[in-house]
Structures are given as structure tokens and as C-alpha cells.
Image (tube, helix red, strand yellow):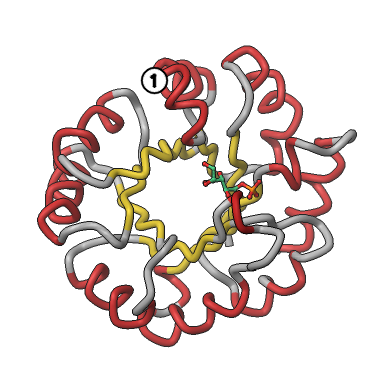
Amino acid sequence: MKLQIALDTCNQKEALAILHDVADFIDVIEVGTPMIIEYGMEPVRAISKEFPNKLVLADTKIMDAGEYEADIAFKAGAQIVTVMGITHDETIKGAVKAAKNGNGKILADMMCVQNLEERAKELVELGVDYICVHTAFDVQDKQSPFDSLSKVQNMVGSQHSAIAGGINIHSVDKVIPFKPEIMIVGNGITGQDDRRKTAKMIKQLLV
Ligand SMILES: O=C([C@H](O)CO)[C@H](O)[C@H](O)COP(=O)(O)O
């Protein structure tokens, strides 16, 4: 199980400082969507250069122009790029093509997908590597991603599954029994007073 840190609401300097603090316990570094909206691919370039031994994920949440947009992120140094699972198959196929050309992987974000199991199966058949059940920031006070994880795993297996959305040290135990390939934690690490200690504790729970 890989631990992915989501860097959402920081600038590049802050992101690098957080990463130097916690990198020992992190497998995948996510340059989050808010960061990409504010700074483009620059943090992806800088972080992949600074941490060549970590996987870097660009949370582009691609909805259209799959090949063109995914290609931009792979060329900037990302090894994993995200696309919205709800979008057109043509967009998914384009992103998968860019991943093949860039020797990278695609993670599909299942936010807003209603037919979760059916769509997860289709996406893996289209060549998507990871299916991520995800509770959006904006609805985390009333929803959680935990129940969706087993549904996805029943269709595509744990090796293709990922989970995100409000996970923290107190809720990790709801994820561990399912052993998804990637568990994503944003504010549950970045928003803590002692980020290094929190990241270490979470990572220790995963192995
Ligand atoms: O993808 C995310 C969100 O949609 C904002 O772009 C977050 O990176 C993801 O939810 C993980 O962050 P936390 O919910 O703070 O753990």
C-alpha cells in the first residue's frame, strides 16, 4: 500500500518544505489541483527534480482533451496523471495513450460517478491503472469514501484501487483491511502541527 501526500493549498516553497519534512514516509507526491490551477506545471517540474526517487502525481482532473492535457503533465515529470472517471471514453483513451507514450500511469477520479462498479470495470478495460474512490472537499462533512472502496475492489481488485477524501490518522483503520494500492492523505498530514510525526504514524500503520 503506497502512501500519497496531497499538496493542495500551498505554494512551491511551502510544498518543498513540507516534503523535506515528511518524504521519508511518503511513496507518492501529489501536486494537487488547487496548486496546478494557481501555478501550472511548475511545481510538478520542481518537485520531480528535487525528489527523483519518489513518484509524482499531477492531479490534473482531466475532463476533456485527454491526450493533449495528460501529455503536458507527463512531459513536466509526472509519473501518474489524473482524469475524471465520469468523462467520455474518448478522453480516457487519449489520456491512456499519453501515459503509454510517457511511460506513466493514469488514475481515474471517481467523484460524481453514480454507476461506480460498472464504470470502474470499463475504465480498467480502457487501460486506466488506478480507480480512486474520492469524497470531494466540498462534501466531506456529509460523505466519506470508505464504503465505495470495497465496491470498486470487487470489480477491479485491490491492485487497481485508490482512496482519497478527508482521510486522517483517526480514519486510516477503515482503509487498512482493504489494502488499496494507494491511500491519499492531504490535510490529514499537511494540516497537522507535527507533519513528520503524523506521516510516520500513518505509514507505520500501512505496513
Ligand atoms: O483531490 C483533492 C481535492 O479534490 C482538492 O483538489 C485532494 O487532494 C484530496 O481530497 C486529498 O485531500 P484531503 O481530502 O485533504 O485528504
Specify the quadrant that holds the N terminus: bottom right
Q: Residue 123: where, in percent of width, then height?
A: 25, 68
Query: What residue is shown with label 1?
Result: 40
39 above or below 8?
Answer: above
* Image side of residue 205 versus residue 124, left or right: right
Identify the element where label 1 is drawn: loop
Q: Is 111 in front, or is 32?
A: 111
Residue 8: percent from the left, percent from the top?
58, 33
Q: Residue at x 34, y 79 (%)?
A: 115
Decide which of 166, 26 is in the foreground and name it: 166
Residue at x-position 52% and y-position 60%: 134
Percent across and percent down for residue 167 are: 70, 57
- Percent across and percent down for residue 38 are 47, 20
Q: Choose top left, top right, bottom left or bottom right for residue 135.
A: bottom right
At label 1, counting other C-alpha atoms closer than 10 Å, the crowd grade (few under 14, some 14-19, many 20 or more) is some
Most extreme residue toward the top, as rendered? 13
The C terminus - image quarter: bottom right
